[in-house]
Image: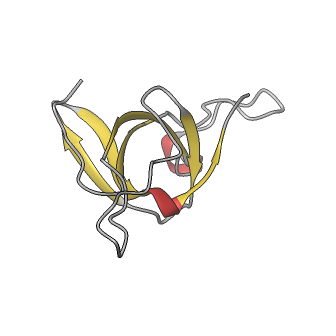
Amino acid sequence: MANIRPLDDRIVLKVLDAEQVSSGGIVLPDSAREKPQQGKVTAVGEGRLMDDGSRAKPEVKKGDVVLFGKYAGSDVKVGGDDYKILKESEILAKMGG
């Protein structure tokens, strides 16, 4: 895991691979795969700075699997792995219970 420490309300995600096989069982080439929109949280900033100087507690934590918008955040490659850094507000949902 890369040593990335996000600032404020930013979140670092390890991008999860797109589906390689369609629901009908057809193996998809790289060019036909949807851009991944799912990631695992690897680091969380301290939270958004509020007007009164306090910090809003992030709603996600390390290890959560989340969904994000197709064009959300910034893609970075660290140590050969793909990560995405985005603001917490760009996360659409948490997966699971």
Q: How many marks?
A: 0
Q: Residue furthest bottom?
A: 51
Residue that appears at 84% across and 32% down: 24
Give the image quarter of residue 25. Answer: top right
Residue that appears at 73% across and 31% down: 26
Name the colour scheme: secondary structure
Q: Give whichever of 93, 31 is nearer the camera.
A: 93
Residue 79 image position (x, y, % from top left): 15, 30
Give the quarter of the figure containing the N terminus.
top left
Residue that appears at 46% across and 56% down: 88
Residue 31 image position (x, y, % from top left): 51, 49
Residue 33 image position (x, y, % from top left): 58, 46
Residue 53 image position (x, y, % from top left): 29, 67
Q: Give whichever of 47, 29 is nearer the camera.
A: 47
Q: Give whichever of 60, 76 is nearer the camera.
A: 60
Q: Give whichever of 93, 52 is nearer the camera.
A: 52
Give the quarter of the figure containing the C terminus.
top right
On screen, residue 30 above or below 86: above
Q: Residue furthest front?
A: 52
Answer with left or right where residue 26 lies relative to residue 49.
right
Q: Residue furthest right?
A: 24
Give the image quarter of residue 5. Answer: top left
Answer with left or right where residue 26 lies relative to residue 91.
right
Answer with left or right where residue 32 lies relative to residue 46.
right
Answer with left or right where residue 53 lies relative to residue 32.
left
Residue that appears at 31% across and 39% down: 82
